[in-house]
Amino acid sequence: MTRRLLIVVATAASFLLAAAGTQAADPARGGTLNVGVVSDPVTLDPAFMASYFELYEQYLIYEPLLRLSPDLKVAPGIASYKQVDALTFEFEIQKGVTFQDGTAYDAAAAKFNLERMLDPKVGSPRRAELGPITSIDVTGPLTFAVHFSKPYPLFPLAMTNRAGLFVSPAALTSMGPDFAAKGVGAGPFKLESWTKNGQMVLSAFDGYYRGRPALDRIVLRPIPDETLRTASLKSGDLQLVDVIPPQMLTQIKGDAALDVTNLPSIGFNAFSINNTKAPFNDKRVRQALLYAIDGDVVNKIAYFNTGSPAYGPISPAISWAYDPSFKPYKRDVGKAMQLLSEAGFAEGAEFTITVVASPIQLRIAQIIQAESQEAGFKVTIRQIDATSLFSVLNKRDFDLCWSPWTGRPDPDGNTFTWFTKAGPYNYSGYTNPVVDDLLMKARASGKQVERASMYQQVQSVLADDAAVLFLHFDATLQGFNRKLHWTPYPDAALRLSDAWLEK
């Protein structure tokens, strides 16, 4: 591990310990926490959550089967588990757990949720995250076993995230299509009201299995404008915001009433390249684009030297698999122009950059535009509403489109669903059987050294194929009022069951 990475990890650990330490005081009960977020979610059904912007609700309305600790370790949650053999996991659910509609959270409900997500007719992106399950057997009222056709040691980790967020079967059945806007889980807060692009009000769930939350309510307000969002934090209208723009970090730190997290993210900021249509269906054109862009310039101008440039999907925070020497592209305008000429675009290749309508995304798009135009591309910029991003990506209605990923604690979560042929987040339409094979073998292996080698091979192939324009490993910069006691996580998700506000 490099000295720089040691410092980053140590800093993250220190911050998390300090944040967790604030929970040791007797929490004040009551009050409303006002949270500013970039955008509304697309859906409240975890079987279909695919947007970056659903991070803010997923652990409030829902509770994962297993929990993830702040240092990214799997811990017991609603259930405990044991691995019986290479192909079988057994789970035992705590007694007395209920969903927010009062129905029992039991083994039958777990089986219902897993089978729903696995059903090809349902079309859930969770199917790829659940691995090669062959059956789920209910072995008692609160016990069940999950069987696999091949080893899948990552299954417990999957149960800490969206694949482990179970809905009330009764609510889903009774609400039908309306469930996506009403969500009923077993999390610490239940939906009280949701006005699209206005606010979402969540109230404390009295029956939460870990005890009623200290906060009475959480109000989530979508505020796309980063300046307004930050100003609302400074004025006291908000007590927590999901993202502090890097250029505003100094002024937030200079306010005695405020603080900001600064944790290494486990995800990546990238731009999906549409591999399925001209001009980027030619590998040489994609390579030309990557040679045209200087990640250090993006890091300096757009991110104000927070975080670090990215060249692949594996974040420095995943230290055992990260290779700090992996830098396959260095800006070379001459090389980019040569590749364009070889591909038949000596007069220039046209493409459009699609980003959400936010100042930082516009700055990034303008950097990409300026640098690629120097290499012979002809570039326009299209801005869209944040809630439309997933639809644009899923329909592949783009040439080059912003594709943020909050990340997963294991490299499988940053690769398998993105770069395998049938991966639900393979927005680029990328295919390479070598990558498919490596990723299948890596998720089945229990040997960390072996897996690290395979993921580094995957990165090399992705780079040569220029599958995606990786740009940045963000720092998780979340601003908050010092009266708020809470525990931040590197994946930027809001886990607020233990949060409270000083009176």
Image: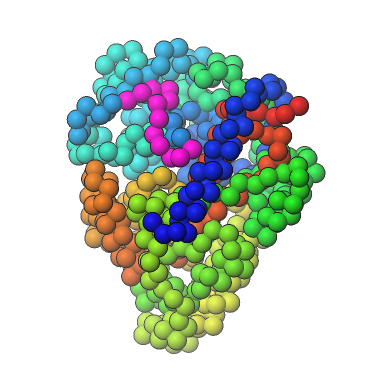
- Image quarter where the C terminus lies is top right
Relative horizontal placement of residue 368, taking residue 35 as reference (left or right): left
Looking at the rendering, which quadrant does residue 64 occupy? top left
Q: Residue at x 19, y 30 (%)?
A: 85
Can residue 219 be seen by looking at this rendering?
no
Q: Is residue 53 above or below residue 462?
A: above
Residue 487: where, in percent of width, then height? 57, 36
State how many labels appear: 0
Q: Is residue 220 above or below residue 224?
A: above
Residue 28: where, in percent of width, then height? 69, 23
Relative horizontal placement of residue 503, taking residue 112 as reference (left or right): right
**Which sits in the foreground, 8 or 310?**
8
- Give, as a single range, the part of the protein colored magenta: 70-81
Q: Is residue 329 magenta?
A: no
Seen as rendered, the residue at the extreme right is: 235
Q: Is residue 107 above or below residue 221?
A: above
Seen as rendered, the residue at the extreme front is: 3
Q: Residue at x 52, y 26 (%)?
A: 187
Residue 479: where, in percent of width, then height? 66, 45
Q: Is residue 80 magenta?
A: yes
Can residue 254 be seen by looking at this rendering?
yes
Looking at the rendering, which quadrant does residue 145 occupy? top left
**Which sits in the foreground, 110 or 115?**
110
Relative horizontal placement of residue 455, taking residue 181 as reference (left or right): left
Residue 131: where, in percent of width, then height? 29, 40
**Which sits in the foreground, 455 or 348?**
455
Q: Residue at x 47, y 83 (%)?
A: 333
Q: Residue at x 68, y 45 (%)?
A: 259
- Image quarter where the N terminus lies is bottom left
